[in-house]
Amino acid sequence: MATQRAKPALRPANPNFSSGPCAKRPGWSVDVLRPALLGRSHRSPEGKARLNEVIERTRAILGIPQDYRIGIVPASDTGAVEMAMWSMLGARPVDMLAWESFGKGWVTDAAKYLKLDDMRLIEAPYGELPDLALADPAHDIVFTWNGTTSGVRVPGGDWIDSRRGGLTLCDATSAVFAMDLPWDRLDVTTWSWQKALGGEAQHGMLVLSPRAVERLESYQPPWPLPKLFRLTKNGALLEGVFEGETINTPSMLCVEDALDALRWAEGIGGLPAMIARSEANLAAMAGWVEDSAEFRFLAEDPAIRSCTSICLVFADPEVAGLPEAVQRDFAKSIAGLLAAEGVAFDIAAYRDTPPGLRVWGGSTVETADISALLPWLDWAYGEAAGRLKAAA
């Protein structure tokens, strides 16, 4: 177990490493919200124009095809995923791929609430991927691109059959704007602004391929759909949802914040620059982990290691061999020490995962701040280890 170390002198300029809501873009201030359309209806021509601007700037940055629909929907990424599942599943057998908390949550919904009879679970433990080749192209496939709670991402889209009969439903909330998504392999894609854009909560994004639209217009699920989930009327797509006419009332402050983040992304060079920034954050962390005796990546295979949700577990056998509850308290002690110093906030691992730490490395995080954080992780580990020994 590590000995105590001297407290580092250099601190991260921005200590926000939460995995959602994530750090605001560099240089952000509340002044960017001053142009927000407040006290006006979001259904006014001006309100609709702001919402549609979010859609079209998103399309341009991410390279989403023109024949794909992009909508702003209620209840963050969760709402977007649920909307897609409740509206489209049941027409074909479904393969549910799960290797982390949120993917497992979609499995629960499909099995317990939608009660899909022809559902197959393909899963793997935290830190690993299931055998993607098992996914049947004749089935609908539901999966996360990047495991926010496991630090594991799929290594591209070649495993998805371009001639598939079923639809692919992809929860991409901690991948989009930091990883290159193959739109021709994705039929339904969801995310929220609060991840890689550093935006605020409650608003989800829903992207539909022409194949997904065809499913919506030709298939009537056997269960009743709440109003918030309805994307069709009399068998036709509600096109207005994909032109800025939201189903519920959005926050125009959050819309203005999203527009600011999108303009920032454009200004730094678009998606390639955002991917490069995030990969640089992972590289800085990887160089430190390589020399660390105390920490290792939860995702041991570099080919599937996330550059956004960077998940660490304990490598020191003295700590890794302790009961899980003790390890979890140890991780909370490290996170608490860092928060008390104002060095890093909200970096304890997600509650359902193996005990450890989780550091957000999306593109709104500066690599200099990641680098400044690393000696503090060593310091906090030593302090927490000292307390653990004293309590033994």
Image (cartoon, rainbow, N blue to C red):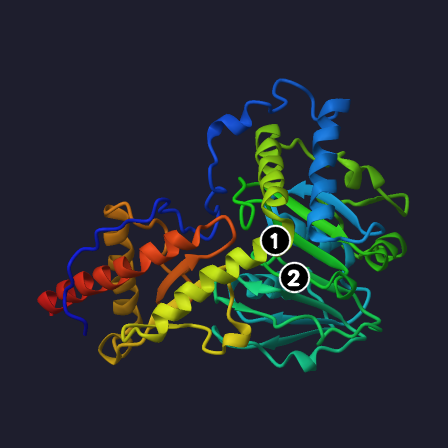
Q: Residue furthest top?
A: 39
Question: Which residue sits at x=68%, y=34%?
Answer: 248
Q: Is residue 67 left or right of residue 258?
A: right
Question: Which residue sits at x=63%, y=22%?
Answer: 37
Quarter of the figure with residue 223 = bottom right
* Residue 53 drawn above or below residue 142: above
Query: Whole-percent x and y of residue 302?
Result: 50, 75
Q: Which label belongs to residue 160?
A: none
Secondary structure under tag 1 reads loop
Q: Which residue is mark 1?
A: 177
Q: What amino acid type should be assigned to the residue bearing mark 2?
A: Asp
Figure quadrant of the C terminus: bottom left
Q: CA distance from mark 1 to mark 2?
A: 8 Å
Q: Which residue is mark 2?
A: 180
Question: Which residue sits at x=55%, y=59%?
Answer: 276
Secondary structure under tag 2 reads loop
Q: Residues within 10 Å of mark 1 (few under 14, many from 20)?
A: many
Question: Which residue sits at x=72%, y=75%?
Answer: 158
Quarter of the figure with residue 261 = top right
Q: Residues within 10 Å of mark 2 (few under 14, many from 20)?
A: some
* Residue 193 shows in the view: yes
Q: Is residue 173 left or right of residue 120?
A: left
Q: What amino acid type should be assigned to the residue bearing mark 1?
A: Phe
Query: Whole-percent x and y of residue 28?
Result: 48, 36
